[in-house]
Image (spheres, rainbow, N blue to C red):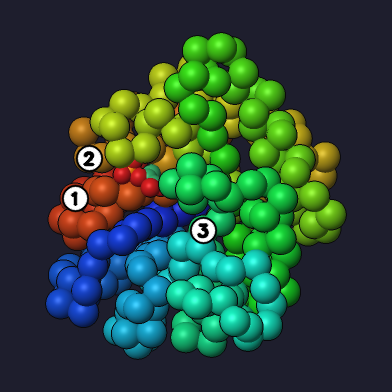
Amino acid sequence: MTNKYMYFIANWKMFGDLRTLNSLDKVIKFSKTNKKNKFKLIYCPPNILIRPLSKRLKNTNIEVGAQNCHESENFGPNTGYVNSKMLKNVGAKYIILGHSENRQDGESDKLINLKIKSAIKAGLKIIFCVGETLKEKKNKKTKKVLAKQIQKGLKSIKNKSDIIIAYEPVWSIGTGMIAKSEDLIKCVAFIKSKFSKKSPKILYGGSVNAKNIDKLKNVNNINGFLIGGASQNSKKFIDIIKKSISN
Ligand code: PEP
């Protein structure tokens, strides 16, 4: 991994409660060793934990993000939802959008595009997930799928280089399977080729853990990792970061 400044983004999905936050003391302590600014840590917990987590992380260099939002910029009759302004208001600085678990629940590229636009307006930084399913991979449709997700998801967005792209093959999420290094290098290069000016940061996500990180960290065109399951355990998460930044 050639990049000096690596991202480690924890996607807690629908895990965690107030007690879980105590386990972060280890990570806070560890983050203080980051004197040379080798990595950036971002936690994306469930919405109910954004406020308490932000408070707990005050005076640390760890930031907080959300996992999804409603596309509307305004308050409205949308039972059970929150919009990006509300998330910003309680402490989120980032937001994951286009996650495959939400795409599988029916989120279209068009809807994701609306969410991205409203989140940018609210001042959130975007972590935009793209990735192919196993069927698409087998049918050699990966590039086509990635191109479509990027083109439609980021339609009419000006400063694309500020967006963090997470390449997450759907077949890799939560399965223990990871992309082969050579495929990963090609996919990341392909994603980069879709941006004419400065390329956005590109992360990899999908079953990253302390065992496979040695392989993944040698893929030198990625800027870090989006980590689901393994990020829920502070020790495992720290192990991944330590291994990633060691030579
Ligand atoms: C994710 O949900 O974004 C993810 C990468 O999950 P996991 O690490 O558990 O595969």
Instruction: Give the residue displayed 55% in from the left and 83% down from the top.
Output: 86
Kind of residue sitting beneath label 2? Ala
Question: Which residue is identified by label 1?
Answer: 236
239 left or right of 129? left
Between marks 1 and 3 in the image, the one whose residue lies nearer the viewer: 3
Q: Earlier in the sequence, mark 1 or mark 2?
A: 2
Q: Nearer the viewer, residue 211 or 129?
A: 129
Q: Position of residue 211 (x, y in %)?
A: 21, 33
Q: Position of residue 20 (x, y in %)?
A: 18, 71
SS type, badge 1: helix
Kind of residue sitting beneath label 1? Lys
Q: Is mark 3 within 8 Å of ligand 1?
A: yes
SS type, badge 2: loop
| Label 2 Cα neighbours within 10 Å, binned few <14 / some 14-19 / many ≥20 | some
Vertical side of 75 occupied by 139: above or below: above
Instruction: Examine the rendering and report whether any part of residue 135 can be seen.
Output: yes
Question: Which residue is identified by label 2?
Answer: 210
Q: Nearer the viewer, residue 30 or 137?
A: 137
Kind of residue sitting beneath label 3? Ile
Q: Position of residue 186 (x, y in %)?
A: 58, 21
140 left or right of 193? left
Quick check: marks 1 and 2 in contact, CB under 8 Å? yes
Q: Earlier in the sequence, mark 1 or mark 3?
A: 3
**What whole-number distance in Å separates the C-alpha atoms at marks 1 and 3?**
22 Å
Question: Which residue is identified by label 3?
Answer: 96
Q: Is mark 1 within 8 Å of ligand 1?
A: no
Q: Nearer the viewer, residue 24 or 106?
A: 106
Which quadrant of the render holds ligand 1?
A: top left
